[in-house]
Image (cartoon, helix red, strand yellow):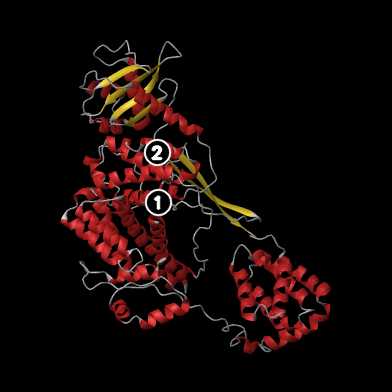
Amino acid sequence: MAANEWERSSAVPVVPPVRPRKLAKVPFVELADGRLQGVVSSGSDIARVYVSSIAAKTDGFSCSTNNNRPCGGLRGRSCKHLDSLMEEAVLQYGADRVARYLHLDVEPAGATGRQLMAALRGSYESTPAATVFSRFLHHLAYLELPGSTEPIPELHWFPAVAAVS
Amino acid sequence: MQGAGLTALQQNDSGLDGALDLVAGFDDALVHGLARLGEERASALTALAAVMAVTPLGERVGEAVDKVAAGSIADEHLMALAGARAALFGAVHDALLGRFDEATGRRRTAWAAPAGAAAPEHPNLLAGSRSWLRELALAGWRGVDHDLVSGAAQTLQAVLAEPVMRRLAVLLDGLAAELRAASPISTMERLPVRRWADLWTRALVLSQPGAAAGAGSEPVSGRLLILGVDVHEHATVIQLQVELAVRQSHPQTPAKVALLWAAHHQLGLLPMASLRERCDDLLDNPLVVPSFPQYLSGFVQALDPAPALVGFVVEMLSKAFARLPDRVLLPWLPTLITTFRQQAGDQVPVLIREAGRTFPGHLSAVESWMPPWSGSAPVPAAAPVPSGGPAVDLLLAHPATCDAVAGLLGCTGGWREVGDGAAAPVDASVTALLAGYPLTADALADLLGAAAR
């Protein structure tokens, strides 16, 4: 489709569909609020989760429990939770979307999470875990919304773009 | 015949092109933000206001464009601009649909304003949504950053929690997700200009008190044929829309319906032309055709009390033999004969005599034979699609006849005089398009009026 035609079309897909991934280790990943952020399960304690994030542009990273105790693995360098977060983000969004959002200077085609982590130039930068965690809870709350048989004509702007195999 | 109609579909129409150019001008203003319009984009808005001046929305749009130029932009001004954009697209839609219907010979019932009960309003939430949309419009798509996108979060959560505001919630959520995913927008190679302006416009219209009245629904029963399922989705919602056909929207026995029609005709309530039109409609409708023989059986049964219908029955039998597909016609023939035997024993000689009078007696006459009923049906005049150019100027200059005819036909769209001092040249073809398809503009004018109260 020519550029002009694309710009003058109403129902063009803008957001590529996210790819399916297993949710056990990293139940929540998103590119929002200028960060790659998410919730990572603790490897040892089933009752504990870590809130991890990497900021766009500054690459400042942060990892703590959901009640703001800093992650023990975070000693001026990234921890295993941040590594998992990046791996899962690449699975979900594809490396090029993650690299573009974070302004990373890598060749994104086929890049792995490890390569993207290596491209980070930032240092520790505190992020309130509560903000990210509430995004997670907000996301879960969608599951609570009741379905409806009322037609939503506005959704004609959002035709399904890919069949789930 | 259809070929000619389809060619007409592809004709250029300066009214449509002009309307889409105006929309493109407005959409471009949204890319860069209404807070810093260049001279060029400001003149695009002026052109929009000049064309809208003929519509009931004209005054509000003119005021809005002035305010935007002066830099003091309130919600109501943005709503007027969104209304103008929606009205233009409404007219374009109606014109294209009219052309399509004309080309395919399709008739459809006129659009009626939704009669559903007004949903309970949440003025604070609507205001919150309008305020976010205003910030987007001021900043322009190129100026949208993380904070601006995140600014929707609180309103969005509250709107999502209200089942009656689901349409607005789903739309805002979809737009916010796209803006988030496109970040950083300032360095995007190309923007979905039309699409985001569409979503913005619709969201603003839905954020207007009184806009989201329930569509209202009408129960139907009958045999459902599922033709397919449309899937709509974005990250947080999915809608399955089943496309289906109802074979009988009112579950009645066709034969009894035919008897009823015959009775109406006998009582003078249903003229022959209307009766013929109804039956022709049945033959035209592929979903009803299989039951057409049952209607005919009903008419045959009606012959006893209404012998005057004998000519009509011969006509319908003739049309049935001419037009019913074999898979319907052949299985039905035995039923037809038994129906004649049982229901119209006395009438069979009359029918045969009538048929003898109607059909040609010799093979040689068949070639030039014309059924007496053909040509009697008035051909409905197709509504002309207004086109631009000198003819429109002429109409605008001499509107008296047009107004008289419009009054006669009950067209209450309403013209407005375009002021001599219009700041921008008015595209007369777009004006004509808006005047020709005023439904959307009228509905939006009502909405704006309702909001002002």
Q: Position of residue B133 (x, y in %)?
A: 32, 45
Pick whichever, B95 or A159, lies toward us: B95
Instruction: Residue B156: give its label.
Output: 2
Give the vertical position of B48 relative to A8 (above or below).
Answer: below
Q: Position of residue A40 (x, y in %)?
A: 39, 20
Q: Quadrant of residue B363?
A: bottom right
Task: Tell me the kind of residue under disc 2.
Answer: Leu
Instruction: Residue B208: give its label.
Output: 1
Residue B189 visible in the current orientation: no
Chain ID at mark 1: B
Q: Quadrant of residue A13?
A: top left
Give the vertical position of B63 relative to A85 (above or below).
Answer: below
Task: Tell me the kind of residue under disc 1.
Answer: Gln
Q: Residue at x 66, y 73 (%)?
A: B320
Specify whether disc 2 shares its chain with disc 1: yes
Q: Residue at x 21, y 26 (%)?
A: A58
> Which quadrant of the figure contains the C terminus of chain B?
bottom left
Distance between the alpha carbons at the discs numbered 2 and 1: 16 Å
Badge 2 element: helix
Q: Position of residue A129 (x, y in %)?
A: 34, 21
Badge 1 element: loop
Which residue is farthest left? Answer: B39
Label 2 or label 1, whichever comes before in sequence order: 2
Chain ID at mark 2: B
